Amino acid sequence: MKKIHTLATSLLGLLFLQNVYAIDLDAGDYDYAPSGTNLAMLYYQHASRDSLYNGNNRVSDSVELKSDIGIARYVHYMDVAGLHIAPQILVPFGRLDAGKDIASLGSSSGLGDIILANTFFIYHDKDKKSTFGITPYLYLPTGKYSKYDDLNLGENRVKLTVQGAYTTQLIDRLNWDIAGDFTIYGKNDDFINGSLKQDLGFQVQTIAKYQINHYSNL
């Protein structure tokens, strides 16, 4: 049990540092909106995990880790020096709960690391409904964090993700997006029994959206 607890503390800590606030591509993220447009959005994700792996080896199937994560996001579209941009702020919040064999990890709730971002629309073709944009995301170490807690919503480090994405309309009502990003990780000097360093991270994503009507899409 102690071995499982120790391994879970290490693996789950890394899991949440890397994935809770990952920049996932959502359909419409790079849609072009007129200057002066303001958007206020709220995202929510519930996830439940019941197995613990070390590499490809299953360590335990009697674990329980639930996460309820929300992100409040505000976006403003504007033109600066002939370039269309969309500055924005994202504020994560939520709760993590551990159970079964890892119940001793406890729970954590509160605010996560605030994210400052700005989309630069490098290319836009209104007729073809095609857009290419680049967005830097700067993560600030504002979230709840303690090296004495097994679960944390904050990372206690600065992080920079730069994402480039292209979106286009393939046929009427059907859009396709593709994006790639890389992440530069700052150093956490207060991580469990030492410090945390991570190599440069990469990610490629693609998504399709079918517009059923003005209010619904698949």
Image (cartoon, grey):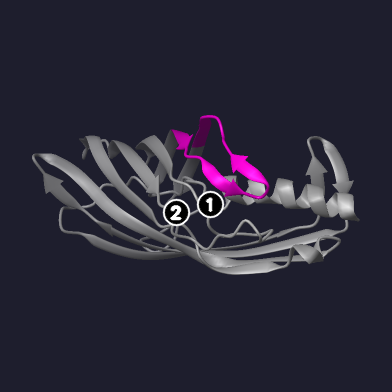
Instruction: Report x, y in % for residue 140.
Output: 40, 52
Q: Residue at x 60, y 41 (%)?
A: 195
N-term mark: 1 or 2 = 2
Residue at the outermost right position = 1
Q: Secondary structure at mark 1?
A: loop
On the rendered image, what quadrant is the N terminus found in?
bottom right
Residue nearest the viewer, comparing 98 with 177: 98
Please provide the residue range marked out in magenta: 181-205
Q: Residue at x 48, y 60 (%)?
A: 143
Which residue was labeled with disc 1?
Answer: 155
Residue nearest the viewer, comparing 15 with 83: 15
Q: Is residue 47 above or below residue 138?
A: below
Instruction: Report x, y in % for residue 70.
Output: 51, 65
Q: Locate residue 112 relative to residue 19 in the image: left or right.
A: left
Instruction: Report x, y in % for residue 11.
Output: 72, 46
Proximity of marks 1 and 2: CB atoms separated by less than 8 Å: yes
Which residue was labeled with disc 2?
Answer: 141
Instruction: Report x, y in % for residue 177.
Output: 42, 38
Question: Does the image show residue 51?
Answer: no
Question: Does the image show residue 198?
Answer: yes
